[in-house]
Image (tube, rainbow, N blue to C red):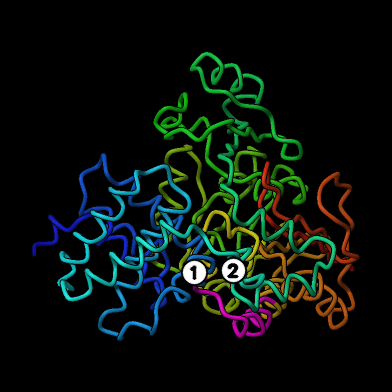
């Protein structure tokens, strides 16, 4: 059967199989979307995101309904049934359509011998309703290790964090302060019939009541606004920018913070933006071009300063390090399937290594802002504590902020279902000699 004719559920099952095999949705979903007409793409995206979001609950139910696991060559049918269960439990779609079309998709996947099984399992699921979740992993739909780690790290908040991770993230904008004030842009949104309100903490942030395609946003193509979570926008409030400074964004892609930095202070001497990924750097340039901003882009490993640094120290460094991304699961639910507990310790070593390397190229009197989109202390305030122990000249600056929690070495934002993602920031200054 040709690719083009494959039913949407069959394509969704293939995407889920790819995620189980280690590909992120951002890698495997775009080619899958391209196989469908434009009007069907949002539904495929919703199917894949929703199945990832509720994977651990759906998996618990499906395994309970199967007498034995499917053979490896038939694993795609396991994912087909997960997609159908997601629709049965979480969508408004007519049950008969879900059942009939899933059986058709099973045939389209060249697995006609399994149509009876698929039909039987889904009819029983429909008849009997959703079972009581067997444990917290199924109840909150997160991997066991993540539930346990959050319970240990945040004994008062772990359930709230897990529930927030399962909520749909709001759409938040950052107004380009070089073009409009926030109030002016709120006025433009009102004229366009788009309901919105100012963010609580980010000075240029606007949260939409309902997401809209970016081409419906006034002046979007001309650089009036960007889409960026409120927590990520807070970096500019901590950098203490002033005209004439040389600024480094050390792990820059996709460029949201690079652009926010340039927008918040129009007369910086230079902003250097580095990223290790050759694939992701063009995205930074696209964002700069749309906003009519200039930065020096370099593809490099930020920690290998001997390979890219020109010897001139930086006044300000923004270090948004690679991390578990445990604070942005609601935007990237595939993290639940992709991340392993064993990833955290190697990530912490990378984070500490980057801090060491950046400290060496920060000017005396300069400021470094350390950021992660993680909620695990091992990547956050504990890294800062470890760094300050070994780097005795580092001065920890406690930001005067109304947001997040004071962790003694930085501030932690936990994901909020009604506003920002989970994020961590710490501010370090290097003393003048």
- Residue 54 seen by the camera: yes
The front one of 370 and 339 is: 339
Q: What stretch is highlighted in magenta?
A: 337-351
Q: Which of marks 2 and 1 is nearer the N terminus?
A: 1
**Disc 2 element:** helix
Instruction: Tell how many labels.
Output: 2
Q: What's the residue at 60%, 64% (across, down)?
A: 132
Indicate the quadrant where residue 371 lies: bottom right
Which residue in the structure is indicated by mark 1?
Answer: 61
Magenta-drawn stretch contains 345: yes
The front one of 187 and 31 is: 31
Q: Do the residues labelled 2 and 1 touch (CB within 8 Å)?
A: yes
For residue 250, the mark is none
Horizontal side, residue 370 vs residue 78: left or right: right
C-alpha gap between disc 2 and disc 1: 9 Å
Horizontal side, residue 244 vs residue 87: left or right: right
Look at the picture and state if 125 lies above or below 66: above
Magenta-drawn stretch contains 381: no
For residue 138, the mark is 2
The front one of 318 and 127 is: 127
**Disc 1 element:** helix
Look at the picture and state if 350 lies above or below 263: below
């Amino acid at each position: 059967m040709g690719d083009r004719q494959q039913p949407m559920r069959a394509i969704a099952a293939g995407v889920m199989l790819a995620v189980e095999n280690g590909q992120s949705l951002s890698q495997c979903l775009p080619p899958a979307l391209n196989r469908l007409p434009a009007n069907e793409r949002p539904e495929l995206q919703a199917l894949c995101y929703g199945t990832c979001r509720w994977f651990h609950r759906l998996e618990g139910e499906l395994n309970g309904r199967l007498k034995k696991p499917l053979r490896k060559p038939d694993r795609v049918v396991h994912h087909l049934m997960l997609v159908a269960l997601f629709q049965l439990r979480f969508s408004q779609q007519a049950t008969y359509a879900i059942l009939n079309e899933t059986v058709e998709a099973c045939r389209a996947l060249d697995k006609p011998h399994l149509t009876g099984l698929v039909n039987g399992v889904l009819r029983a699921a429909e008849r009997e309703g959703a079972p009581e979740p067997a444990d917290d992993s199924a109840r909150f739909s997160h991997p066991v290790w993540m539930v346990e780690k959050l319970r240990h790290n945040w004994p008062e908040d772990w359930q709230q964090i897990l529930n927030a991770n399962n909520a749909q993230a709001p759409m938040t904008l950052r107004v380009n302060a070089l073009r409009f004030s926030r109030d002016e842009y709120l006025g433009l949104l009102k004229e366009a019939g788009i309901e919105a309100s100012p963010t609580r903490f980010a000075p240029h942030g606007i949260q939409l009541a309902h997401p809209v395609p970016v081409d419906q946003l006034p002046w979007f193509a001309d650089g009036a606004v960007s889409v960026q979570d409120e927590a990520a926008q807070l970096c500019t409030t901590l950098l203490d920018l002033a005209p004439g400074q040389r600024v480094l964004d050390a792990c820059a892609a996709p460029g949201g913070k690079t652009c926010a930095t340039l927008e918040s202070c129009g007369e910086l001497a230079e902003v250097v933006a580095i990223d290790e990924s050759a694939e992701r750097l063009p995205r930074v340039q696209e964002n700069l071009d749309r906003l009519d901003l200039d930065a020096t882009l370099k593809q490099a490993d930020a920690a290998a300063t001997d390979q890219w640094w020109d010897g001139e120290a930086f006044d300000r460094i923004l270090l948004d390090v690679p991390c578990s991304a445990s604070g942005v699961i609601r935007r990237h639910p595939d993290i639940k399937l992709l991340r392993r507990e064993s990833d955290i310790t190697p990530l912490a070593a990378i984070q500490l290594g980057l801090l060491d390397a950046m400290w060496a190229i920060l000017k005396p009197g300069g400021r470094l802002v350390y950021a992660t989109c993680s909620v695990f202390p091992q990547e956050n305030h504990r890294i800062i504590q470890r760094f300050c122990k070994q780097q005795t000249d580092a001065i920890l600056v406690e930001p005067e902020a109304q947001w997040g929690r004071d962790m003694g070495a930085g501030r932690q934002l936990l994901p909020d279902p009604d506003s920002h993602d989970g994020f961590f920031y710490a501010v370090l200054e290097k003393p003048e000699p």
